[in-house]
Amino acid sequence: MLMNQWYVARGNAKKGPFTSAQLRGLAKKGQLRSSDMLLRQGSQTWVAAEKFSDLFPAKSEVAPTPST
């Protein structure tokens, strides 16, 4: 994600602008949901946050604990 200003919408609430770094921080804290909608400043198209893989990296699988 480039260094742009972003707006976040959840339901009827819109917040922002946020930097890309701020969005990553919100996602890490669980304050940004994959279902939230994002709008880049200057754009007119809202996009689901889940479309940005750097916000929600795939969780690595935990290896099963071996039995003793």
Image (cartoon, rainbow, N blue to C red):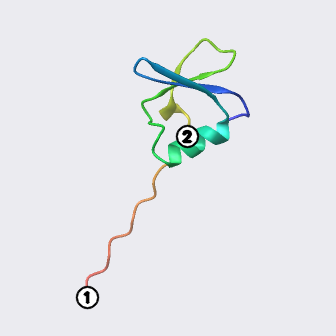
Q: Residue at x 58, y 45 (%)?
A: 25
Q: Please give left or right for residue 62 compared with residue 54 in the image.
A: left
Figure quadrant of the C terminus = bottom left
Figure quadrant of the N terminus = top right
The residue lying furthest to the bottom in this view is 68
Residue type highlighted by circle 2: Ser
> Where 66 falls versus 34 (above or below)?
below
Number of numbered discs on residues: 2
Query: Residue 24, percent across and down?
Result: 59, 43
Lower position in the chain sequence, tag 1 or tag 2:
2
The residue lying furthest to the top in this view is 44
Q: Are marks 1 and 2 in contact (CB under 8 Å)?
A: no
| Crowding at mark 1 (Cα within 10 Å: few <14, some 14-19, many 20+) | few
Q: Nearer the viewer, residue 62 or 16?
A: 16
Query: Residue 18, percent across and down?
Result: 64, 31
> Where 42 falls versus 61 (above or below)?
above
Residue 22 falls in which quadrant of the image?
top right
Q: Is residue 62 visible?
A: yes
Residue 46 falls in which quadrant of the image?
top right
Q: Please give left or right for residue 40 compared with residue 31 in the image.
A: right
For disc 2, the marked residue is 53
Q: Residue at x 72, y 34 (%)?
A: 2
For disc 1, the marked residue is 68
Residue 17 falls in which quadrant of the image?
top right
Q: Residue at x 67, y 34 (%)?
A: 19
Q: Is residue 54 visible?
A: no
Q: Residue at x 69, y 15 (%)?
A: 42
Q: Secondary structure at mark 1?
A: loop
Q: Which mark is residue 44?
A: none
